[in-house]
Image (cartoon, grey):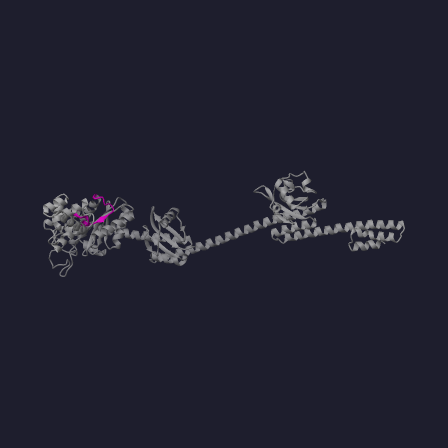
Amino acid sequence: MSTHFLELLAREASAVEFEGPIVEARAQGADPATIEELEQAKIQALKVRALLRRRARREAELSALYDTAGDLAALRDLDAVLEAIVHRARQLLATDIAYMTLHDPEQGDTYMRVTDGSISAKFRALRLAMGAGLGGLVAQTATPYATADYFADARFRHKGHIDEAVKEEGLVAILGVPLRLGQRVIGVLMAANRSARPFHQEEVSLLASLAAHAAVAIDNARLLQETRNALEELSQAHRTARAHGEAVERAALAHDRMTSLVLRGGGIEDVAAVVTEVLGGSLAVLDDLGRPITGDVGELDAGVFEAAQASRALGRTVRRGDQLIASVDVGGEPLCTLVLRSDDADERILERAALVCALLLLFRRSVAEAEGRVRGELLEDLISRPDSPGLADRARRLGVDLRAPHVVVVARHGGQRERAAFWASSHATVRHGLAAGRGDEVVLLLPGVDAGGLAQRVAAELSASLHSPATAGASPARLPEAAPGGPTGGPPGAPAGGSGGGATSGPGAGPGGGSAGARDVAEAYQEARRCAEALLALGRAGDGASPAELGFVGLLVGDGRDVRGFVGRVVGAVIDYDARRGTALTDTLSAYFGTGGSPSRTAEAMHIHVNTVTQRLDRIGKLLGDGWLEPERALEIQLALRLHRLGHTSSPQTVGPGPI
């Protein structure tokens, strides 16, 4: 009969089926001894069955632990490993749900990391304070805890939000074991049922083993991430070092090319070409005043110059949008600024290019200063020692032809002598003229005939360079005219023409003699100086003018006083109108000023109706333009009328230095 029980064990029959042989024997009328023997055989068979089931369960547990160890050895994704551990815990313990919480060191509590079998969103979002609920107690004490009925267990500190989440999930029996790394608890692995049940010691041990594997997985993932981070940092450092080395090498090669260019006599344009070839984009080089030396600058706003100032202060390139700006100064004074339009470029190359351009400009400045001293000495001799021998030859060697029309400009400034002298020297060199500094003024001898225009241009540009008003007076140097028959333009031995003085020899009058042009420069200098002083006295600092633009004041400061020109500029329109129409506007204007500006008394003096006076005054206003009755303008008109009555407009003539 025992063979029946062996067959039942072999096919893993249920415990109820082991009653079958006994029931069958009783039905066949077996004696009591046989029944007792079968009962004993059944008991032994059931013991064997229970032992086999425990071994099968242990085999499954060991297989699960082996699979978990395999997951760890394969270094799978941490989330996948933790999910597998929680899922195996639920299967091996035959619970309704399994989940894992991890410690949050920043907030000091634990949060839900992985769940398997959960149906409540509130439960999955639950956070447990240390010591709160079963999970919080396990995390705080680092000891496994189990309860067959969570809500009836008073060992835990129940919290309202925790109990609500547990009730929503429908949990009753809960087992929790700590996840430990050494003496530190990093989380809790938990298994729970939605009905009351006890948890045996074997189940606690199994869950603790899975928790140990989970802790190892978490620590391995941390170490692996730290290793990856370290490798990434090393790779980034290597890439940075390599890029830095390549940038330094490119900068050195570019510097060598620029240096070679300079040694071969190249200029700023050549340096700019090298920079654009190496870096790409478009490059503009600006001088100390922000004016372009080379390149297309486009529209430059105030932000560019602020960035240039910041670059000089920081000693490095400053980025502004798509512009890289490098600026160099010497002694606190800006020397040059490089503006590169490029999205990404090596700043070192731009900075080296700025230094090379600065050296080139310093070299040019040194050459210009040396040439400026020579030009300044010549101009000083023309002004102070006009009879010195060889002035014309010296001028020719510097590219200045004293026989051509020239203008002397005297610019008064309020200081900054070195900067003003450098500007004047550079300006004169470009214009093929001469320049010299004399105290708080600079003197320029420039080719041209428009004295007033040159004075205004010099005043404006020098004021911009100095950032303070510069006032310029100008006077034409009336040089002898060249003509066939001799070097001065007349027959040999004939006196030189012009109103500048009675010289008898031209600019090329021989190596041992003086120059009529030199004497004219000295006289024009004095007149230009008086013009500048008159502008300052009139409150027109920062302006420029020649005697012709000063009105009647020009008659006082000028050497050759062009009365006819003055009268023509002030009241010529009225005089010409009378000549064409046969009217008496000039007489009416004189009578009007003579009667103190009264139309009625003007009408009486001229024996005409007052309406006629009004009509004539309207016509005069249209001819003279707006503002003719303003005090300063009215004074000039009255002076011009008096000169007209003296006969200074019938033919071109000038009045000598005596009283008018």
Residue at image x 10%, y 45%? Answer: 604
Q: Nearer the viewer, residue 34 or 558?
A: 34
Indicate the position of residue 5 as horizontal and vertical percent values.
82, 53
Indicate the position of residue 38 as horizontal and vertical percent values.
85, 51
Asked whether residue 656 appears in the rendered view, the answer is no
In the image, taking residue 123 as reference, residue 249 lies left or right, namely left
Q: Is 188 above or below relative to 249?
A: above
Assess whether residue 545 is covered by the magenta stretch.
yes
Q: Nearer the viewer, residue 599 or 354?
A: 599
Asked whether residue 241 appears in the rendered view, the answer is yes
Assess whether residue 415 is covered by the magenta stretch.
no
Numbered circles on residues, count: 0
In the image, taking residue 532 as reference, residue 280 lies left or right, namely right
In the image, taking residue 145 as reference, residue 534 lies left or right, namely left
Residue at image x 30%, y 51%? Answer: 366
Q: Nearer the viewer, residue 594 or 396?
A: 594
The range drawn in magenta is 537-552
Indicate the position of residue 250 as horizontal and vertical percent values.
43, 56
Quadrant in which the N terminus appears: bottom right
Q: Nearer the viewer, residue 365 or 176?
A: 176
Indicate the position of residue 349 as horizontal and vertical percent values.
40, 54
Which residue, as the protein is rendered here, is positioned at the far bottom? 484
